[in-house]
Image: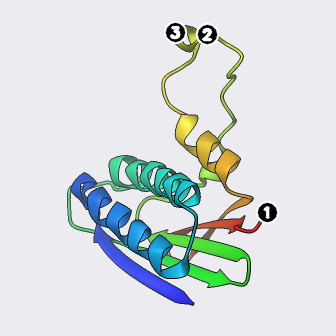
Amino acid sequence: MDKVLLVNNKIEELTKVARFMEELGEEWGLPVPLVFSLNLVMEEALTNTISYGFDNNGSHTIEININKTGPLLTIIITDDGREYDPTQKKDPDISLPAEERPIGGLGIFLIKKIMDSVRYKRTDNRNNLILTKNIES
């Protein structure tokens, strides 16, 4: 089963993505806590892309492709923004008190903790963030 959602590079589009994920969760019979976690993943990934991924204020389309094959759920987020591999970002030192930690870096850390696999590839001048999760484990 494949589902595709196209959104603009505007923070306001996160509401559309959350609604899409909730409808998908209902359609595919996903547990509510899983849908909540997937929504968090989507919000973090898309906020980073929208906020930091583009060199101009022009309109850009971000493609979200979600596939469920058996127990494996795969989300591919594709954009034409600046090349950036978030998987290369060093995990924050969460042993430090919050006030001593540098700002930023928790989003991709949360994504890595929630998903089973987080991969990146650049193809045809497009970023592809590939997220997978075994939804039966």
In the image, is 89 to the left or to the right of 20?
right
In the image, is 112 to the left or to the right of 126?
right
Name the disc covering residue 97, or none. Answer: 2
Disc 2 from disc 3: Cα separation: 6 Å
User: Element type at marker 1?
Assistant: loop
In the image, is 111 to the left or to the right of 116?
left
Determine which quarter of the picture holds residue 61. Answer: bottom left
Which residue position holds label 1?
137
- Measured from the top left, where is residue 28 in percent x and y? 54, 80
Q: Residue at x 56, y 54 (%)?
A: 33
For label 1, the crowd category at 10 Å Cα-Cα, with few meaning under 14, some 14 to 19 and many 20 or more, is few
Residue contact between numbered discs 1 and 3, judged by CB atoms under 8 Å: no
User: Element type at marker 3?
Assistant: helix
Asked whether residue 5 appears in the rendered view, the answer is: yes
Disc 1 from disc 2: Cα separation: 32 Å
Residue type at the position of mark 2: Pro
User: Element type at marker 2?
Assistant: loop
Name the front one of labels 1 and 2.
1
33, 101: nearer the viewer: 33
Asked whether residue 124 appears in the rendered view, the answer is: no
Tell me the quarter of the image containing the C terminus.
Answer: bottom right
Mark 1 and mark 3 lie on one chain; the one further toward the N terminus is 3
Tell me the quarter of the image containing the N terminus.
Answer: bottom right
Which residue position holds label 3?
99
Name the front one of labels 1 and 3.
1
